[in-house]
Image (spheres, rainbow, N blue to C red):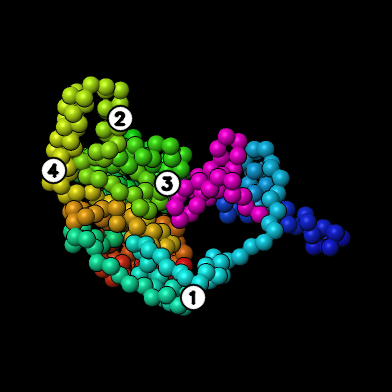
Amino acid sequence: GSLYDIENISIVHHVNNALRAHKMFQKDKDYIVKAGKVVIIDEFTGRMMEGRRYSDGLHQALEAKERVPIQPENQTLASITFQNYFRMYEKLSGMTGTAMTEANEFADIYGLEVVEIPTNKPIARMDEDDEVYRTAREKYEAMIAEIEDCAKRGQPVLVGTTSIEKSETLSELLKKKKVKHKVLNARYHEQEAHIVAQAGVPGAITIATNMAGRGTDIQLGGNLEMRLADETAGIEDEAALARKTEEVKADIEAKKRQALEAGGLYVIGTERHESRRIDNQLRGRSGRQGDPGRSKFYLSLEDDLMRIFGTDRMDGMLQKLGLQEGEAIVHPWINKALEKAQQKV
């Protein structure tokens, strides 16, 4: 008989799941292995989704792939789409920093109008054009040269990557160059508050996944509350406590001035996400409350988003145009084309 005979249909299902687990799901991007369990990583927030499991035998296939104990299948009793669930409410409203890109969807699905509220202070951040390199190697070299320059000048840098694996690749490259830095991804989520608290200190280099892109407030000079909690713990004497508090405040003020003089927080994107919203959220970490700042995305033709759009022809064209090793193309038209590409994905 054939593999597709009715009595063999479950075998086909297992084979398909095994193929999906091996070819479509990547460790340290889509999931991590923690304490002998496969834990899903949310592609939008970069955080672990403890207790959530893929259905239909896919999670078991991933557990078999990673050779960890195979847990029983969860049973789904009912399911509903987010859109239908939200429409069950009589009153519906929301607030986010990145709704304008989805204004049409809010109007079509929920009949909601998106209103843009002006910022508290004018934005002084410089959003630079994307730099596109032929290969990922050239892109990383350019990025590391820029990071080294910022570290020397005392400008704090937040580097946004699209996965745990990519954040760790960049970390290895910086270690080789002996550049001091911190890594923030789902593996180190316990240290998140401390890493974010120090990310605005002059010359601090922080490499992060999408975790640092949403709602994270990176304060230039460092986080006062966090430092006071760390440095005044155990001080009983009130006079000593007041002295220490003033000392920390003065130090943070001095460091803030230093960071501002160096240009504020510099956000570097290592590639474009499929969702423009996530890129905008990352950019928004810099230039908060009228502070100066900078943002720039470094891309290559080998990036996931670029590969979707068949970059082989473009690569040949760039070679014909005489694009040198380590040289990038920078033009506002490229930004426009990428924006269109992100809408299609």
Label 2: few (<14), some (14–19) or many (≥20) C-alpha neighbours in 10 Å: few
Q: CA distance from mark 3 to mark 4?
A: 32 Å
Image depth: mark 3 or mark 4 in front:
4
SS at mark 2? helix
Q: CA distance from mark 1 to mark 3?
A: 35 Å
Q: Callout 1, which amino acid?
A: Ile
Q: CA distance from mark 3 to mark 2?
A: 31 Å
Residue 39 placement (x, y as % from top left): 56, 44
Image depth: mark 4 or mark 2 in front:
2
Task: Judge whether 197 appears above or below 45 on screen.
Answer: above
Nearest to N terminus: mark 3 or mark 4: 3
Nearest to N terminus: mark 1 or mark 3: 1
Q: At 29% across and 60% down in the image, what residue appears?
A: 130
Nearest to N terminus: mark 1 or mark 2: 1
Nearest to N terminus: mark 4 or mark 2: 2
Report the residue marked by disc 3.
166
The disc at residue 257 is 4
Q: Name the one closer to the observer, 119 or 168.
A: 119
Report the residue marked by disc 2.
230
Dominant SS in magenta: loop
SS at mark 4? helix
Nearest to N terminus: mark 1 or mark 4: 1
Which quarter of the figure has residue 88?
bottom right
Task: Judge whether 31 appears above or below 281 on screen.
Answer: above
Report the residue marked by disc 1.
109
Q: Which region of the structure is painted magenta?
A: 27-55
Magenta span includes 31: yes
